[in-house]
Amino acid sequence: IQLTQSPSFLSASVGDRVTITCRASQGISSYLAWYQQKPGKAPNLLIYAASTLQSGVPSRFSGSGSGTEFTLTISSLQPEDFATYYCQHLNFYATFGQGTRLEIK
Amino acid sequence: EVQLVESGGGLVRPGESLSLSCAASGFAFSDYHMNWVRQAPGKGLEWVSSISGSGTYIYEADSVKGRFTISRDNAKNSLFLHMNSLRAEDTAVYYCARVGGYQPFDLWGQGTLVTVSS
């Protein structure tokens, strides 16, 4: 199963609402997670089961979707949100999307 | 403190071998499925291999099958990745990560860099 994220690069401003899409090549029900990664750091889990917010993650992050199309939304960008975001198929043979780099406009 | 700490990375020549370790602390290690994930310089995340809590079940990416072997020592709260026949394309930061299967990776180590170059 392949995961394709769009866009690959996104430029936005503090306070903007942004949405990142992850499309699966086959239906994966809700077996999808989202991670945030900052330069030189390990990824950090944001969302799992497509829409469940990981403990400690700010509520401005939300996830939705099922089957083949999923979205990660940040309702109001904060300076610390500029990072790279990855979706992941939750499976014994895990697959990650290619990543979306979110930069400050 | 709940944490994972990788070690063992370094510079090796193509065709050589290297073993990585991941020391777990702060949680019941044997209860958790564990993984290795790598990230080549400037690239995305690639899942490498995973092992069940008991060590009974092992899963491997096609890119490393037959060359890399995952193992664990629950008595020592440690995860290992034995890498043989290393190639330049194996150059990456290698992370260990907790859980997997139908569960997300909720705990990651800081990573250890493996460089394969002549």
Image (cartoon, coloured by chain):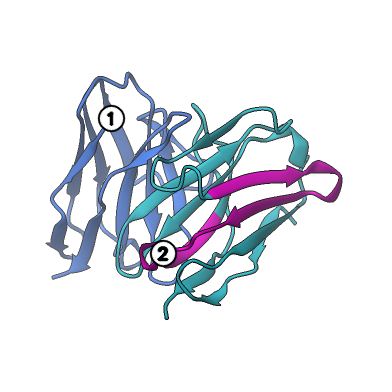
Chain colours: A blue, B cyan
Identity, as a three-letter code, of the amino acid under mark 1: Ile
In the orientation shown, which residue stands out farthest toward the right?
B75
Q: Residue at x 37, y 64 (%)?
A: B40
Q: Which mark is residue B35?
A: none
Q: Position of residue B44 (x, y in %)?
A: 32, 57
The 10 Å Cα crowd at callout 2, few under 14, some 14 to 19, many 20 or more, is some
Q: Nearer the viewer, residue A102 or B113?
A: B113
Chain where mark 2 sits: B
Q: Which residue is mark 1?
A: A1
Q: Nearer the viewer, mark 1 or mark 2?
A: 2
Q: Which residues are magenta?
A: B68-95
Q: SS class of the residue under badge 2?
A: loop
Q: Which residue is mark 2?
A: B87
Chain where mark 1 sits: A
Q: Which quadrant, please, contains the C terminus of chain A?
A: bottom left
Q: Position of residue B25 (x, y in %)?
A: 77, 53
- Locate residue A27 relative to residue B107 in the image: left or right: left
- Asked if residue B35 can be seen in this view, the reply is yes
Q: SS class of the residue under badge 1?
A: loop
